[in-house]
Amino acid sequence: MSYPAADNVKLFDFVGRAFVAFLFAMAVPGKVTGYSSKVNYIVSRGIPEPLASFLLIAAIVVLIAGSILFVFSPNTRIGASLLLLFLVPTTLIFHTFPVDAGFVRNLAVIGSLILAITRSTAGATPNFRAIR
């Protein structure tokens, strides 16, 4: 038997995950079409060129896989973990010195991903009770 309140929670959970993933998915086209300029920007932050190219390719793959898994996988922890794997070093390397608006935005998204990881129940209705 399905309960309307549980269906609403699942719907809002899906919509919330889709909105968060949209932020990451929208970053992919610019990284692909402006590949060389993105590599140059990474190099300007002190990362050697061969590593910068590898990291950008890895970032594109992680962004795509993480976004898809975060929205559509029955276990959203994997997708959220991949997105955190991208977002934490990106925030530290590109938004910390000097601190900019991206830093604050990324902290908020990091918080939402941590909540998704710690509160996820692998496809069931999310459990928002305090962990004891």
Image: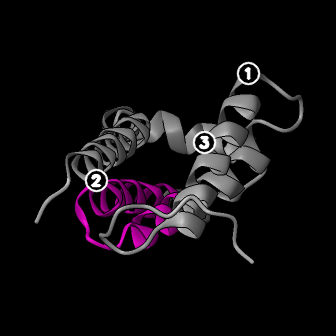
For the residue carrying disc 2, how many other residues have a C-alpha within 10 Å: few (<14), some (14-19), or many (20+)?
Answer: few
Mark 1 or 3, nearer chain start: 1
Q: Position of residue 7 (x, y in %)?
A: 22, 49
The correct choice, above or below, for 17 with respect to 19 in the image is below
Element on which disc 2 rests: helix
Disc 3: which residue:
109
Pick the quarter of the image with the N terminus.
Answer: bottom left
Residue at 30%, 70% (x, y): give it: 123
Instruction: Name the disc covering residue 101, or none.
Output: 1
Distance CA(mark 1)–CA(mark 3):
13 Å
**Residue closest to the eye, 7 or 27:** 7
Q: What span is colored magenta in the figure?
A: 56-83
Instruction: Name the disc covering residue 6, or none.
Output: 2
Pick the quarter of the image with the C terminus.
Answer: bottom right
Element on which disc 3 rests: helix
Identify the amino acid type marked 2.
Ala
Residue at 47%, 67% (x, y): give it: 120
Mark 3 or 2, nearer chain start: 2
CB of mark 1 within 8 Å of CB of mark 3? Answer: no
Place residue 99 in its image quadrant.
top right
Q: Position of residue 78 (x, y in %)?
A: 42, 73
Q: What residue occupies the far left of the structure in this picture?
A: 1
Identify the amino acid type marked 3.
Val
The correct choice, above or below, for 64 with respect to 121 in the image is above
Residue at 37%, 32% (x, y): give it: 30
**Most common SS among magenta residues:** helix
The correct choice, above or below, for 98 with respect to 2 in the image is above
Identify the amino acid type marked 1.
Ala
Element on which disc 1 rests: helix
